Each structure stands twice: as structure tokens, then as C-alpha cells.
Amino acid sequence: MKNKWFLWFIVYFSAFCVSLSQFKIATIIGDLIGTMGLANPANIAYLMSVFAIAGIILAIPGGAILGKMGPKKLLVCLMVSLLLGNLIGAFAIDSFPLMLVSRALEGVAFSMIIMVGIVLISGWFAGTKIVGTAIGLFCTFPAVASGIMLNASTPIAGAIGMQSLWLIVGALVFLGLILVAAFVPNPRPSADGGSGAPPEEEKASIREAISNGKIWLMAICQGCVVFILFTFLQLYPYIFNVFYDLPETTANFYGSLAGWFGLPFSVVSGVIIDKFKRAPLLILIAFIMIAIGCFILNMLTPATYILQILIISIFTGITISAVLIVAPSVAKRPSLIGYSIAFVNLIYFIGIFAGPAVFTSQVESAGPQAGTNVLTAVAILGVLAAIVFMLANRKKPAA
């Protein structure tokens, strides 16, 4: 397929729009609290975490939905849901319940964008030596979106109003919808002219997919890393403000660095895996470094702020890319790949939902050290899961 990189860009842009929607409120939390008249500022965390609720609900059914609709139709539906969420949100600035509804609609897109993206990209780049690189590049979309939003949202909201953030993102989503509808091809029919559905003996089930212990270990790794990553991506400004009493603009700047630092290393992880086939070892090393980054969170000085951000950004990006490359390879047969990825995504969304809420509740109830301890414990769980996976996978290294 000669235009596979152009198609890759369309899928990447679609996923990028999803993450723009997710992170657009991260730096205007204080203004939203005032506008909505929230008595408990901790409630604002639910506007970020509710984004993942649809993912938790739809992750497993997503595999069946993908099989029935096909990747193009499903991607169009996801972009429509994202567009509606942004349009509703633009007129719900002063309504907490309605804003929750709009965020849930945006979350529907988030719930399946990774699965659709991996399926499409894996198909377009199948048989090439750069499939890992393409997936690694795709995995940079949260980092790019967070880096842009954490720097741009406050100036934009200050200049033309908070509502403009929803309208601008909505316009980008509409552009993405047009590109998907116009250029992403429909799946080719099967060779016998049928629907392309697998023969009866090849049909898969979620029960069979999750009977594979290796998929559970990869899901645990993914859940742990996103619990940590999205806590930092969404709450770095909060952390630097509460832990170190930095002014809002400075805290936002440091928070934005997390996204930018993660970019090159998500790409590098794909290249490394393509060339050396050592993804499980890479995951283990990354989790050890993430554990160190979490452990020192409450001990930083101005000279080490960036070092901690660099550690988290580099090694979470590497881990996510590596897990998404390893997980399909440990499915027992090809027809189980979709359900296997769906299960990994279920734990992924649970991690995203739980991370910011658990962290903020611990900090507010017991102080910064309690939040630091939670993140460190989750990173250690990731280390243990990676070790067990390597032991279980010794006889057949994952590609």
C-alpha cells in the first residue's frame, strides 16, 4: 500500500484529537471550579477520570463491535461521538452534570481509538520491518496532545474564553472526521467474496483470550503504567503547585514537559523492538526506572524537577509502546488478537480512571507522601508482572 503513511497520519490525527479533548481542562481546573460553583474541588478530578469510564464499559464489547462494524465505520462513529462531546461541552461551562455527560461522550471515542488504531496500522504495515516503528509513533499521540494543551489552553482561555477550547478542538475533530470518511479504505472482502468473517473453527471468544496468563501479565503492566502516566499527565501542574508551591504558569510549563520528553522515546522503543526483539526486558527495565521516578517525587529540588519528569516521560512511553507490540504476539492464535487487545485496553482504562482519583484523594487526606507511596507501589507491581512474564516466556520469546 503506497499511501500507508498518509493513512497512518489520518488515524494518528484522529487519536490526537481524542487526547486534545482529554487534556483541555487540565490547566483550567481552578477556573472551572469557580464557574461551576463546586463545593468540593476534588470533584473536578471526575471530569478527567470520567473520560475513562466509557473505556471500562466498552473495552471488551469493543472487540465484537469492531468485528461487526469494521474499523472504518467504527472510527467514523468514534469521531462523531467526540464531536458531539465537544459541542455539548462548549455550552456546559457552568453545568457540572452536563459537562460530565459531554466528557463521557468524548470518552466513547477514547474507549476504542487505540484498538482501532492498532488494528488498522498493524494491517497496513503487516509484512514490513517497520510495524513496530509505526505503532511506536502512533503511541506518541497522548504525549503530543498533552504537551500542546498544557502550554496552549491557559493562554487561549485567557484571551478568548474557556468555551473556545471546546470549539477549537471540535473544529479539529470535524476535520479528522472528514479525512477518515474520505480517505480511510473499507476492509477488503475475503478471497471467496464473503464478508471476511473467520470460519467457524477460527472464531474467538473473550473467555478463550483471557485464559492466556501472558495476556493478563501484559494487561497488568499496561494498567500500572497508565495509572502512573495519566496521573502525572493530568496532575503534574497540581503536583508542582501543591507539593512545591510553584505558581500556576510555572507548574503548567513543567507539566507540559512530560509530553514532549516522551515523544522521541516512544518512537525509539518501536525501533528497538523491531531490531532486537527484546520488548519484555525493555518493559522490566522501564518499570524499574519508573519506580525510581515515583519514589523521589516528594524529594525534588528545583535542580531535579526536570530529571524526574524526564524519567517518567521516557520510561512510561517505552512501556506503553512495548506492551502494545508484545500483546498481539502472545495471543494463542490470530483470531484471538482482537479480544486480547480489548482485554489489555480494559485494564488500561481502569488504570487511567483510577490513577488521578486515587492519587488526589490520598494527597488530600494524608498528604503528598501518601500520594507518592501509591505511585511507587503501583510501579513495583509493574516490575513484578514484567519479571513473571519473562519467566513464563523463556521458551518462546515474544517478537
Image (tube, rainbow, N blue to C red):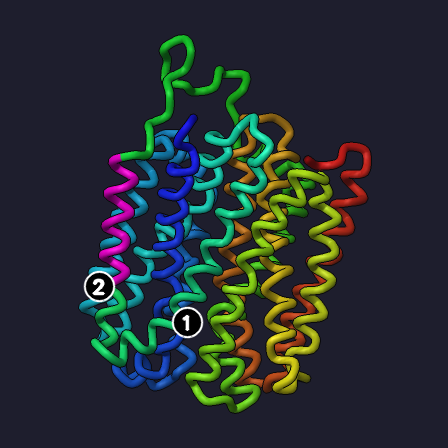
Q: Is residue 190 above or below residue 171?
A: above
Taking the image as shown, residue 217 lies to the left or right of residue 56, namely right
Taking the image as shown, residue 153 lies to the left or right of residue 391, namely left
Q: Tag on residue 150? A: 1
Query: Is residue 241 in the magenta section?
Result: no
Q: Is residue 289 above or below residue 10?
A: below
Quadrant location, the N terminus: top left
> In the image, what residue type sits under mark 2?
Leu
At 74% across and 45% down in the image, what residue appears?
A: 389
User: Dot 1: what SS?
Assistant: helix
At 42% across and 73% down in the image, what residue appears?
A: 45
Residue 81 coordinates in the image, percent (x, y): 27, 50
Quadrant location, the C terminus: top right
Quadrant assignment, res 211: top right
Query: Is residue 61 visible to the viewer in this orientation of the structure?
Result: no
Marks 2 and 1, the one that precedes in the sequence: 1
> In the image, what residue type sits under mark 1?
Leu
At 35% across and 50% down in the image, what residue appears?
A: 109
Query: Which one is nearer the viewer's eye here, 190 or 63?
Result: 190
Circles 2 and 1: CB atoms closer than 8 Å: no
Query: Is residue 175 in the magenta section?
Result: yes
- In the displayed orientation, state which residue is furthest to the left: 91
Q: CA distance from mark 2 to mark 1?
A: 17 Å
User: Dot 2: what SS?
Assistant: helix
In the rendered structure, which segment of residues is drawn in magenta?
A: 168-182
- Magenta segment, prevailing SS (helix, strand or loop): helix
Quadrant assignment, res 92: bottom left
- The residue wearing badge 2 is 167
Residue 67 coordinates in the image, percent (x, y): 41, 30
Mark 2 burial class by Cα count in 10 Å: few <14, some 14-19, many 20+: some
